Amino acid sequence: MLSSIYTFAVFRAARSVLSFLVVIAALAVLWEVVKLLGGDPSEAWTPPFQWTVASDLNMPHLWDIAASFVEPAQRNGPPLGIVLVNAGFFTFREAFGGFVFGAVLGLALAIVFVHSRMLERALVPYVVASQTVPIIAIAPVVVIWLRGGWLAVAVISAYLTFFPVTIAGLRGLRSPDPRALELMRSYASSSRDVLLKVRLPAAAPYLFAAFKIAATSSVVGAIIGELPSGIRDGLGGAILNFNQFYVSGPPKLWAAIIVAAIVGIGFFALVRAAEVLFLRGRTAPSDA
Amino acid sequence: MTKRIGRYLPAALVFVGVLGLWELAVRAFGIQQFLLPPPSSIAAAFVEHFDELMTVGRNTLVEAVGGLVIGGVAALVVAFAIARWASASRALLPFAIAANSVPIIAFAPIMNNWFGILNPLSKMMVVAVLVFFPIMINTLRGLTLVDQASLELMRSYAASERAIFAKVRVPNALPYIFTALKVSATLSLIGAIVAEYFGGARSVLGQFIITEAAFFRFANAWAAIVVASAVSIAFFLIILAIERVAIPWHASARIVDSS
Amino acid sequence: MTDSVVRVRGVDKVFGIGADKTPALQSIDLEIPKGAFVSLIGPSGCGKSTLLRLIGDLTQPSAGTIEVNGKTAHRARVDRDYGMVFQAPVLFDWRTVQGNVELPLEVSAKDRAGRADRARAMLALVELSGFERRYPWQLSGGMQQRVAIARALSFEPAILLMDEPFGALDEMTRERLNLELLRIWKQTGTTTVFVTHSIPEAVFLSTHVAVMSARPGRILEVIPVDLPQPRNDLTREDERYFGFIKRVRERLRGRDVVRPGAAEVAAS
Ligand SMILES: Nc1ncnc2c1ncn2[C@@H]1O[C@H](COP(=O)(O)OP(=O)(O)OP(=O)(O)O)[C@@H](O)[C@H]1O
Ligand SMILES: [Mg+2]
C-alpha cells in the first residue's frame, strides 16, 4: 500500500519535471526564433527585422551563454562555470542560514502568539509591517552591526523568511479542532503536551507550505543582502560585477542569472521533497 | 468603542514604547548616527526633506503601480487563457511554481539594458516580472480549484463552458486574485527599490537612500525608509479596501461577532 | 402506452476497469408516471445516487436505456427538464439568496423580464420571503436547503431529482421540510425522484417506494403507498402508515423472496 503511494508520488514528480523541461525547451526555441527574426545580422543570415531587445547585446545566443560557462571569467582565471558554482554555494549557504534563522524565529513567534492574545495584538501588526520595509535599504546597517560576512547576509535573509512561517504557524497551531484541545485539557495535559501532541502536528502542513515560500525568499534575501554589503563571493556580487562589465560580455550576466535560478528552484525542490517525505511518513501509519 | 480601543491599545503601546527606548538607548549609550540615528533625528530629517521625500516617494510609487498593472494584467490574461485548457494548465503549473522560486531581482540589470536605464519602464518591468508569477499561479488555482458539486449543478442545467466560466470559475477565483494582489502590493514596492539600486534616474527612493547613506546622512536615509514602508502599507490598504467593495460576500469581509 | 415521465430499461452500471471493476447497478427497470413521487431507499452504497445521476444524465449507463419525457436523458438535460437538489445545498457564496435562485433562469436565458419576480415567488413558496438579499452563509442549514429547493423549482423543471436533500438536518427541521416539500409538490405537480435513508420519510412522502438491495444494486420491489392525500401530521399516526413502514423494513432486511427486475410502477 505504502509503496504504491510512493510510486504515485514519484510518477507525479516525474511528470512535473518533464512538463517543466518541455516549457523550458519551448522558451529556448522561442528565444532563438526571436533572434532569427529580429536579431543582429550574421554572415549566414540577415533577419527581416531589427529589434533592439533582440540584439546580441540584449539577448545573447543561447550557445554563447552556454559557451561562457567554460570560458575563463577573468583573464587567466578559472572558467566562469566554476566561479559561478562556487558563488552559488556561497549564496546557498547564506540562504540556508537565513532559512534556518527565519524558520526558528518565525515558529517561536507563532508559538508565543498562540499562547498570548496580548502579545499577539501588540506585535503581529509590526510583524506584518516589517515586510514593507525594503530590506535592501536596511541591509548596509545590518552588515555594519554584524561586521560583514555571510552570517550578516543570513540575518538579512532571515528578515524575509520568518514572516510566512509566523503567519502560517499561527494559523496552523490554531487549526486543531477546539474539541480536541478540550479533550486534552480534560486529561489535564500540560500546555507543553498540547503543543507537542496536538498543535504542532496539526500545524505541519501549514508550516511546510510556508517553508516553501521561505526557501524562495531566503535566496532572494541572500542576493539582495549581498548587493549593498560589499560581499563579492556570492551570486549577488557576481550579478553586480557582470552588470558593470555587461557591454564586454553579456552572456556572463545571463549565466549568473541562470545559476541564481537553479539555486532558487533547487532550494524550493529540496523543501518540497522534505515535505513529501515528512508528511507522508506521518499519515501512512494511520492508513495501514 | 472601548472594545476597539482595547484591541489596538497593545500595538499602540508597543509603538510608543519602542520609539522611546530607541531614543533613550541611542542617547544613553552614545550610539553613533551611522549605526542607528535616534527617532528624533529621523523625524527632523523627515520634516526638513519633506518635499524631496514626497517627490522620490511618488516616483517610486509610479514605478511600483505601473509594474503591478503590467504584471497583473499579463498574469490574468495568461491564467484566463490557459485555464480553459485543463491540460495546458496542468503542464504549465509546475513551470510557474518553479519560475516563482527564481530570484527575479537578478533580472533587474537585464531590464535596465532592455528598456533603458533611465526609463521608468525598466523598473516597472522588474516589478511586472516579480508579481507575474504569484498572481498567475493564484488566479489559475482559483479558476481550477472549483467545487465539483458546483460544476455538477451547472451541468444539470446544461450550462455552456462559457457560462460555467463566467458564473462559477471567475467568481471563485476573485478571492485568490485579491490575496495575490495584497502580497504583490508590498512586493512591487520592494521590487522597484531594488531595481533602482542597479542604477537609473536619481529622484527615486532607492537612489535617495543610497546617496544619503553614501554621504553618512543616515537620518535622511532612515526617513526615506519610513516613507517607503508608509507608501507600501498605504498601497496594501487601498487594495484591501477595493477587495472589501469588490467581494463583499467573501469570508474575509464577514463581520464576525467576536465573543 | 402509459404517460411515464421516466422509463429505465435494463440498465447496468459498472464503475472502473479491469481488477477495480465494481458493478454498481444491475438490470434496473423502473417506470415513473407523471406527477408521481418516487423514493429510492436501500443500504448505503447500493447505487441510489448512481441511479439518480443516471436519470439526470450526470453519468451514462453501461447497458440499457433511459427515456425521459420520450427523449434520451441527454436530450432531456439539454432541454433543461431537470431540477436537481443534492445532499449539500451547493449555493454560490458570491450570490445573494435571490441571485442563487435566479441562477438556472440566467443559464437557460429563460424569462429575462420575469426572472426576479419568479425567484421571489419561489422563495415565498419555501417561506423565505424577506431573505432575498442575504448571502447563503447568513442562513441556517435548513434555510440553505430550502433555497436549493426554490432554485431547483424556479425554472419549472419537468422532474425534480433529489439526493438526500434533508440528510444533514435535524429531525424536527426535517419533518417540517417534508411537509413543505409535499405542499410544493401538490402545488406544482412536479414528478419527483427522492433518495433517502429514512424509511418513515420515504413512506410519508411517496406515492411509490422503490426498495433496493446492495452489491450489485437492484430494485427489489416498488411498493405503492396509497395513503390518503394530502398528507399531514395525522398521517404519521395512521395505522396503515406503520404498516407500510413495516413492509419496507422487512423488504430491506430481505425477508421476502427476491424477484429481480420485476419492478414496474403501476400508473396511478
Ligand atoms: N465515480 C465512481 N467511481 C467508482 N465507483 C463509484 C463511483 N460512484 C459510485 N461508485 C460505486 O457505486 C456504488 C454505488 O454508489 P452510490 O453513491 O450510488 O451509492 P448510494 O446508494 O448513493 O450510497 P449512499 O446511501 O451511501 O449515498 C458504490 O459501491 C460506489 O463505491
Ligand atoms: Mg448517495
Image: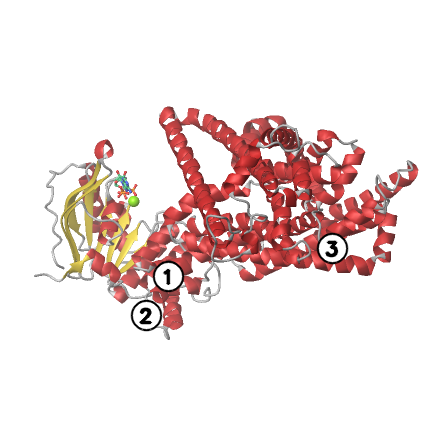
Chain letter of the residue carrying label 3: B
Query: Mark 1–mark 2 contact, CB under 8 Å?
Result: no
Amino acid beneath label 2? Lys
User: Which part of the image, by quadrant, shows the N terminus of chain B?
Assistant: bottom right
Q: Residue furthest front?
A: A43
Amino acid beneath label 1? Ala
Between A31 and B234, which is closer to the camera in this rendering? A31
Q: Residue at x 59, y 35 (%)?
A: A215
Instruction: Assign a secondary structure to mark 1.
Output: helix
Task: Give above or below for A264 relative to C196.
Answer: above
Instruction: Assign a secondary structure to mark 3.
Output: loop
Residue B37 shows up from this direction: yes
Q: Which residue is mark 3?
A: B204
Q: Position of residue B163 (x, y in %)?
A: 37, 61
Tell me if B54 is positioned left or right of B188 in this view: right
Q: Residue furthest left?
A: C1
Q: Quadrant of ligand 2?
A: top left
Between C152 and C54, which is closer to the camera in this rendering? C54
Amino acid beneath label 3? Val
**Dot 3, how many residues are within 10 Å of its Cα: few (below 14), some (14-19), or many (20+)?**
many
Q: Which residue is mark 1?
A: B163
Q: Which residue is mark 2?
A: C110
Chain letter of the residue carrying label 1: B
Total marks placed: 3
